[in-house]
Image (spheres, rainbow, N blue to C red):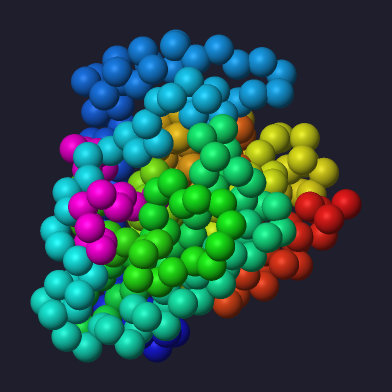
Amino acid sequence: MEDATHTKEGAKLEKNRDNSDFEASKLRTETSGQQSMSQTTECLTTGDTQNLESASIAAGFVRVKYDAVWKGSATDFMHENPGVQNVFYKTASELAIAAELLEASGAAPVAEDDKVAGNVAARIVMNDVDFLVVSKSGKQAGGQVSVEDDFCIVTEFDPVQWSLNYYAQSPSILPTSDSPLHHAVLHAASQFGWSEAPYASLHGHALESSDEAERLGIPCSTKETLFSTPDDMHELLSLVKEHPYPADRIYVRKGHGFLVLGKTVAEAVETFKAQVVPYIAQ
C-alpha cells in the first residue's frame, strides 16, 4: 500500500486550487449554505451530557448532509481503473480491521439511532487515480466488517457544491457522513505545506471534550459544530493548520470526537492503540 499510495505524484496537488476551493467553500457556508445549517442547529437543544451530534441523531436528522452521487459499484470502478484492485482490497481489509478495533475498544460507541458512531478512511494514489476508501454511513453495531458491503470509494469531493461522487455495492449505501472531514484532512498536506502527508484517518468518539484533550496534550478545536457540514470541515482544517501533521497525529473536534492520522492504516492503528486505547481503558 505504501508504495502505491505515497508516490510523489500523489502528494503534489495544486496548492492554489486547494486554497481557492477552501475559501470558496467558506464563502458558501457564509451565504446560501449557512442558513439551512443554522436552522437545523437551532432546532437542536443540548444539555450538559448531549452534544450537537447526539442531539441531531436523537432528533432524527439525517447523518449525511452532503449530496452523494452514486456512479456505480466497486466492481465498475475496478473495470474503469484496471490495476487498482489489489491495492483497494488490501487497504479496505486493513480499514475493516481498524473499524472493528474502534468498535470493540469502545472508541466507536452505538449512537442514538442504534448505529455505530465512528468511521475510517484511507487515500490511495496510483496509476494517475486519486481516491478515498471510506466506511459506509450507518453501520449496525456488532458483527464483522465486510469489505464488499461496508465500504465506499469516493472519487471526487466538491467543497463548494458540498457534494461527492462515489462507488458502492448499491446506491442505497452512502459513504460515511464524515467523508468531507476525511477528504479534507487527507488532502491538507499540500494546502498547508506539511513535510509529510497522511494517507489514513480513524475517527471515533471516545475523546470529544476539551478537558479530555487537555489532559492528554491533544490539540482540540474551540467551537462545536454540527457534523457533516461545511462548518465542521472548516473547524477541523483550522485546527490541523495550527497543529500540523506529523508533529501532531491526534486531534479532537469539540463535541464531535477524535481523529487519528497516519502515513498508513497500520501506523494510524498503532497510534490509536498507544495513545487512545489506554485512556479508554481507564
Please identify the dominant SS of the magenta region: loop
**Please, is residue 216 above or below residue 111 in the view?**
below
In this rendering, does residue 47 appear at all? yes
Q: Residue 159: name its quadrant.
A: top left
Whole-percent x and y of residue 81? 16, 79
Number of disc labels: 0
Question: Which residue is found at the position 61% from the left and 50% from the top?
Answer: 108
Which of the pair 117/24 is nearer the observer? 117
**Please, is residue 183 above or below residue 63 in the view?**
below
Question: Which residue is found at the position 76% from the left and 67% from the top?
Answer: 274
**Please, is residue 197 above or below residue 252 in the view?**
below
Q: Residue 39: name its quadrant.
A: top left
Judge whether residue 222 is colored magenta. Answer: no
Q: Which residues are magenta?
A: 159-176
Which of the pair 113/165 is nearer the observer? 113
Whole-percent x and y of residue 211? 77, 35
Residue farthest to the right, as pictured: 282
Whole-percent x and y of residue 83? 22, 88
In this rendering, does residue 17 appear at all? no
Specify whether 177 is left or right of 46. Answer: left
Whole-percent x and y of residue 132? 33, 64
Residue farthest to the front, as pictured: 143
Judge whether residue 163 is colored magenta. Answer: yes
Specify whether 64 is left or right of 129. Answer: right
Rendered-image quadrant of the N terminus: bottom left
Question: Which residue is found at the position 44% from the left and 17% from the top?
Answer: 41
Specify whether 16 is left or right of 227. Answer: left
